Image (cartoon, helix red, strand yellow):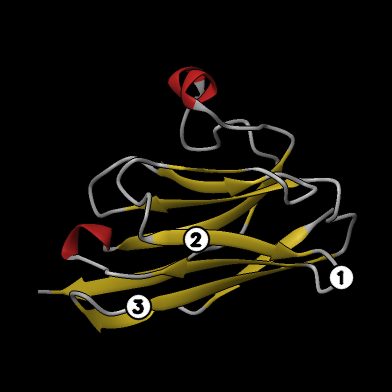
């Protein structure tokens, strides 16, 4: 069973950057798509970004497109979310996930939170952005 651990959250000012990392252990990481999701206080968990298992395709929520970048290092069993130009609306607990779902507009439209069909989830890391 793959286990995921996120690090890199913290408190920053609007306009700052943060880099979240997710490390997988205990299973076959390289065959899974890796995703980042977030959950703001009082709101449902939402999709942020995904990278396919081979790393050749990425997909982003409109709200983060152009500001966030997802990447992965299969040799190190890590997935990273580089977040730039953060704003208070990005405040949330950020979760790393692994699974066989490849997200696009169509699949997101029918995916059911909080799991969205993904198989494994980390415990999350808190990102707080102050104005």
Residue at left 83%, top 56%? 29
**Residue 120 in sight:** no
> Residue 76 in the image: x percent, y percent?
81, 74
Q: Is residue 93 above or below residue 11?
A: above
* Distance between the alpha carbons at the discs numbered 3 and 2: 11 Å
Q: Earlier in the sequence, mark 3 or mark 2?
A: 3
Question: What numbered label is drawn on residue 13?
Answer: none
Q: Is residue 103 above or below residue 51?
A: above
Q: Secondary structure at mark 1?
A: loop
Q: Please give the count of numbered marks on the rendered protein.
A: 3
Specify whether 65 is left or right of 52: left
Read off the residue under disc 3: 17
Secondary element under disc 2, as helix, strand or loop, is: strand
Q: Nearer the viewer, residue 123 or 34?
A: 34
Q: Is residue 74 left or right of residue 69?
A: right
Can residue 6 be seen in this snapshot? Answer: yes
**Residue at the spot 72% in from the left edge and 47% down from the top edge:** 56
Q: Which residue is mark 2?
A: 69
Q: Which residue is mark 1?
A: 75
Q: Callout 2: few (<14), some (14-19), or many (20+) C-alpha neighbours within 10 Å?
A: some
């Amino acid at each position: 069973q793959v286990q995921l651990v996120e690090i890199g959250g913290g408190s920053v000012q609007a306009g700052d950057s943060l880099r979240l990392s997710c490390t997988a252990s205990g299973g076959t990481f390289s065959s899974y798509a890796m995703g980042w999701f977030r959950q703001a206080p009082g709101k449902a968990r939402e999709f942020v970004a995904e990278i396919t298992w081979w790393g050749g395709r990425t997909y982003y929520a409109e709200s983060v497109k152009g500001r966030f970048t997802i990447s992965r290092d299969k040799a190190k069993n890590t997935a990273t979310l580089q977040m730039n130009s953060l704003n208070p609306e990005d405040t949330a607990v950020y979760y790393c996930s692994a699974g066989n779902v490849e997200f696009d507009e169509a699949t997101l439209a029918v995916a059911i939170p909080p799991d969205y069909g993904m198989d494994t989830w980390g415990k999350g890391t808190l990102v707080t952005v102050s104005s």
